Image: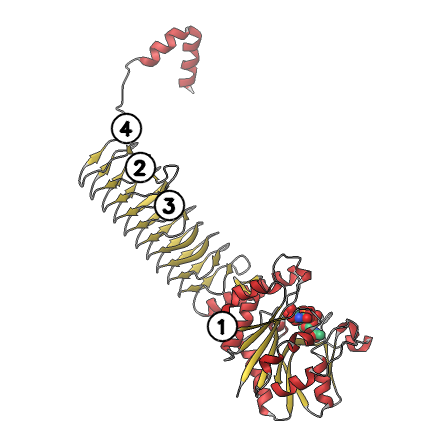
Amino acid sequence: MEVCAVVMAAGEGKRMHSKHSKVVHQVAGKPIVQWVADALCEAGCTEQVYIVGEKQEEVRNVLGETVAYVFQEQRLGTGHAVMQATPFLEGRSGYTIVLPGDSPMVSAKTINEALKIAEEDEEYAAVLITAEATDPTGYGRIIRNADGDVAKIVEHKDATEEERKIKEINSSMYVFKTTLLLSALGRLSAQNAQHEYYLTDTIEILIGDGYKVGAYVCDFDDTRGINNREQLMEANKIMNRRILNRLMENGVQIVDVDSTWIHSGVEIGMDTVILPGCTLLGNTSIGEDCIIGENTRLDCVQVGDGTVIDSSIATQCIIGKDCRIGPFSHIRPDSELKDHVTIGAYVEVKNSTIDDYTRARHLTYIGDSQVGKNVNFGCGTVTCNYDGQDKAGCVIEDNVFIGGNSNIVSTVVLGKDSYVAAGSTITEDVPPLGLAIGRSKQVIKEEWVARKNRLRGANFIQLDRKRSEV
Ligand code: UD1
Ligand code: MG
């Protein structure tokens, strides 16, 4: 059976008060309209046309050229929007799924259930996707006849007091027989409260032609449309909870669902624990038996099994197996930490490779550098990777020991097994097994303090004594 889809995405989204098209705002890290496209693809419908308006470039940037687009010049209502797809629909048989571009909670299951009902009975011209709303204000209401069959849809603004009491709402998601949709679209008028061509009127027209219209009643949450910031916030909360539930079903321990935010593209292995306050974004993937948190943000990070990350931020990087990160570490883009690496408090790593068992436990900056296995960074080591114009890094080979408070100025090479004395500024290569001392020699001045105090007079000697007593 031929199935295609029309998605209405030309709305200006005035109620969002945004510079951007409403349908490109994100829910759980994915643009709203991408959720719709993905649900259609998952339901097996790849022939999709999007009705786009003024901000069409933003929609095209999200969905790319795998789908078709039609520009709706004037925004004359949902019926008018679907009319723009006429050239795309003409000559097709089978079914057309119509969806609003602002409803990210739509699922492949919902689409397929409605399609199934449509295919079950030849007499159905259309199947509506409806839901029971606790507060149906603003939605179109489903009017059913004495037998319980759908008779028509009445928009809130056109509804009588009695009709407004109906809780069953139109989700604006439909399955139509394509030929009958085309025939009904040609007969729409804009004689209503909003002077718009309502797609909802096609239902009464088709029933008038003697056809039946079915309904698939689904969960209200699956139909939620987003028109303003509050609805966007609510949709994010619901979607986030669904993602967390799916992860928990797969054996991930989420300690606090209210303070944990995880994007839809994130994968997490079994027995990993996510502590409160974590934000896991993009296509982050975390292995098994990890502990992540509290208050950690990982954005497009790959984490190996058994790694512990505590109160840290990492972006676009790879962290291997059994690493210990944090607290308060910052791993920046294009960094790769191999296995058993320790990155501790106030350590920043950028665009660097760090091999197995290397440790930088405190207050260190590693930038643009290549670091071997089993290297020890003393507290306060800095790779000086910027000369004011260009960025360049150092090479630090296996088993190097760097004493505390050292500067390693690019582009030196610290040879295998070499030592750097504490407090050194290293500007030349260090040979393997060598020791580099790059600091001024210590000078001792015997009795210096006593001499200083004598010069200042007796009072100061008293003061100094008091000080030492404290
Ligand atoms: C619509 C339905 C209503 C339903 C509700 C569900 C109609 C007349 N009403 O109302 O029964 O309960 O959705 O959320 O269909 N759009 C265009 N071009 C236009 C007008 C709209 O592309 O000229 C798009 C919008 O971008 C949006 C969708 O169609 O994605 C729905 O339009 P919207 O204005 O949000 O309709 P509602 O008032 O919500
Ligand atoms: Mg709407």
Q: Within 8 Å: ligand 1 and the Cβ of disc 3?
A: no
Spatial CA distance of label 3 from label 2 is 22 Å
Q: Which disc number belongs to residue 439?
A: 4
Q: Which disc number belongs to residue 363?
A: none
Residue drawn at x 51%, y 66% is: 243
Image coordinates of residue 79 in percent, x first then y, are: 69, 77
Q: Is residue 363 placed above or below 15 in the rendered structure?
A: above
Query: Quadrant of the rendered structure where residue 441 is?
Result: top left
Disc 2: CA contacts within 10 A as few (<14), some (14-19) or many (>=20): many
Q: Which comes before the other along the chain, label 4 or label 3? A: 3
Amino acid type, label 2: Val
Nearest to viewer (mark 4 / mark 3)? 4
Q: Are marks 3 and 2 in contact (CB under 8 Å)?
A: no
Q: Is residue 206 placed above or below 392 in the rendered structure?
A: below
Nearest to viewer (mark 3 / mark 2)? 2
Spatial CA distance of label 2 from label 1 is 49 Å
In the figure, is residue 305 to the left or right of 165?
left
Spatial CA distance of label 4 from label 3 is 26 Å
Could you tell me if residue 374 is visible in this image? yes
- Quarter of the image that includes the C terminus: top left
**289 or 175: which is nearer to us?**
175
Nearest to viewer (mark 2 / mark 1)? 1
Spatial CA distance of label 4 from label 2 is 14 Å
Image coordinates of residue 26 in percent, x first then y, are: 56, 62
Residue that label 1 marks? 66
Residue that label 3 marks? 344
In the figure, is residue 122 to the left or right of 468?
right
Q: Which disc number belongs to residue 409?
A: 2
